[in-house]
Image (cartoon, helix red, strand yellow):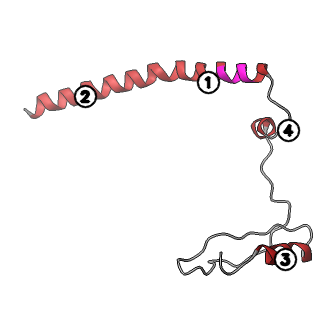
Amino acid sequence: MVSAKAGEIANKLANNPGKIAIYGWHRLNGMPIQPVSTVHGGALKTPRNRFTELISTEGDLSSWVLLSAGLIAAGHAGLLRPVVTASHKAGVYLLGIATLYAA
């Protein structure tokens, strides 16, 4: 990255405590589309819910959690299979009827 160096970002953050730095997209010539910005406060955080709490835990996931997740995924797959099968059959039959009608 040509225009902003890590030192510039670090200095902006040091001069603006409690803020976060946003920096990223560049044009093909290397110029930033938006320069380093520290207008947003540190309150921009990931929304907290059961899933984000689970994946952000620092410890290892227990075998109970992994088994539960596997069973839930298998249950969803078990529900999805007949829906996909039925919709596929309906589509094939409709295509066949349309083909017979067009002939």
Image quadrant in which you'd find residue 5: bottom right
Residue at which label 4 appears: 58
Discs 1, 3 touching: Cβ within 8 Å = no
Q: Secondary structure at mark 1?
A: helix
Q: Position of residue 34 (x, y in %)?
A: 66, 77
91 left or right of 38 in image:
left
Q: Amino acid at mark 1?
A: Ala
Q: Residue at x 72, y 23 (%)?
A: 66
How far apart marks 4 and 1 lie (CA) works out to: 23 Å
Q: Amino acid at mark 3?
A: Lys
Image quadrant in which you'd find residue 75: top right
Of the 4 image quadrants, the one containing the C terminus is: top left
How far apart marks 2 and 1 lie (CA) works out to: 31 Å
Dot 4 or dot 1: first in sequence order is: 4
Q: Position of residue 21 (x, y in %)?
A: 79, 69
How far apart marks 3 and 4 lie (CA) works out to: 30 Å
Structural crowding at the residue carrying mark 3, measured as other residues with C-alpha within 10 Å and reported as few (<14), some (14–19) or many (≥20): some
Q: Amino acid at mark 4?
A: Glu
57 left or right of 95 in image:
right
Structural crowding at the residue carrying mark 1, measured as other residues with C-alpha within 10 Å and reported as few (<14), some (14–19) or many (≥20): few
Structural crowding at the residue carrying mark 4, measured as other residues with C-alpha within 10 Å and reported as few (<14), some (14–19) or many (≥20): few
How far apart marks 2 and 3 lie (CA) works out to: 62 Å
For the record, the magenta segment spans 66-70
Dot 1 or dot 3: first in sequence order is: 3
Residue at which label 2 appears: 94
Q: Secondary structure at mark 3?
A: helix
Q: Residue at x 54, y 81 (%)?
A: 29
Residue 73 bears which disc, if any?
Answer: 1
Residue at which label 3 appears: 12
